[in-house]
Amino acid sequence: MIRISGFCFLFAILISAVSSRTEVCADEPAVAMQRERIQFKSSMDDSIQEAILIAPSSGNQLHKPVPLVVSLHSWSADLSQRNELEKLVHGRGWIYLFPNFRGVNRSPQACGSRLAQQDILDAIAWVTEHYQVDADRIYLTGTSGGGHMTMLMAARNPKLWRAASAWVGISDLAEWHARHRETKYGKMIEQCCGGPPGFSLEVDSQYQARSPITYAADARDVALDISAGLKDGHEGSVPISHSINVFNRIAEARGDQPVTEIEMSQLSRPGKLEPARAGDEGFDPTFNRKYFLRRYSGKARLTIFDGGHEGIASATMAWFDKHP
């Protein structure tokens, strides 16, 4: 779950298809936050899809275009998921959009499918039609399964995003399946892709088409922040190699030096680089964490931080602030 300190918790979370909940935090200014469930038609299959929207005011009452933050739910979640990023976005007076994109990753329609990708684009189109959105400041983020979709959408639609922030994302579904073949995640991937890797050419094509690593080079000009906790893969479900490999594809596409296999091996103990290059290690106050690897390639940044399978809302907003 995305975390940040210094903000109040929700008093209550209650939403239905016909109603929304107004929340006011006791230790913050009395600014109402209304969570609205919107519906729109998929431009691919004409189905009715949904998203959660939190706007500073309703409809065209916005006095000027404002940034839009698109936040993507995690692997086993749907619209019922909450995170503290929504409070930070609302506190800025920005618009927060939380698409469902076919919900939990356990069906062919979900898990990076063309339908799921289009749902995110259609949700954005609905918001830009009904609200005054600054089209030059559309931001994207997600954690875990949301990190998977963030990396995928950043590569598939590179000109849409002002900046993107991907946390502990899955970049290669076949590789992740090999790790989780006998767990619920392995079974869920098979439900999405039609079987295990090697089952058929069609199944293998599904694994490839839904994996961010396939298109990562196309994100070489995106302000993409890729972050992973050092302990993930040991105490969590997604090894740091998934984040590093996407960064490496971007670096290679730009002619920059990738993270080496030796460096990856040293970090994956988990441990530290021996020796570390200048700038690799330090403390980031927006993370409130130490980091053990930080590399850049063009507008992209890779951070392996002191943590596990998690995202950090304060660091996400700080990355967006770097790209106003």
Image: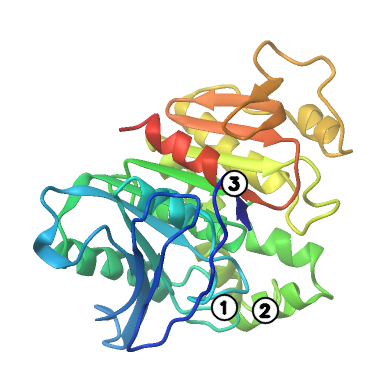
Query: Which amino acid type is shown beneath numbered disc 1?
Result: Val
Residue in the image at 28% along x and 79% along y = 44
Picture quadrant of residue 193:
bottom right
Q: Nearer the viewer, residue 28 or 163?
A: 28
Q: Earlier in the sequence, mark 3 or mark 2?
A: 3
State which mark lies toward you, 3 or 1: 3
Residue in the image at 42% along x and 62% along y = 24
- Whether residue 41 is visible here, answered yes or no, is no
Q: Is mark 1 in CB contact (under 8 Å) with mark 2?
A: yes
Residue 237 rendering spot, x and y as whole percentages: 76, 59
State which mark lies toward you, 3 or 2: 3
Query: Which amino acid type is shown beneath numbered disc 3?
Result: Ile
Q: Which residue is mark 2?
A: 188
Residue 168 rendering spot, x and y as whole percentages: 64, 50
Left or right: 261, with 227 as reference point:
right
Quarter placement of the N terminus: bottom right
CA distance separating discs 3 and 1 = 25 Å
CA distance separating discs 1 and 2 = 9 Å
Residue 291 rendering spot, x and y as whole percentages: 71, 28
Picture quadrant of residue 105:
bottom right
Q: Secondary structure at mark 1?
A: loop
Query: Which amino acid type is shown beneath numbered disc 2?
Result: Met
Q: Which mark is residue 4?
A: 3
Q: Earlier in the sequence, mark 3 or mark 1?
A: 3
Q: Which residue is mark 1?
A: 104
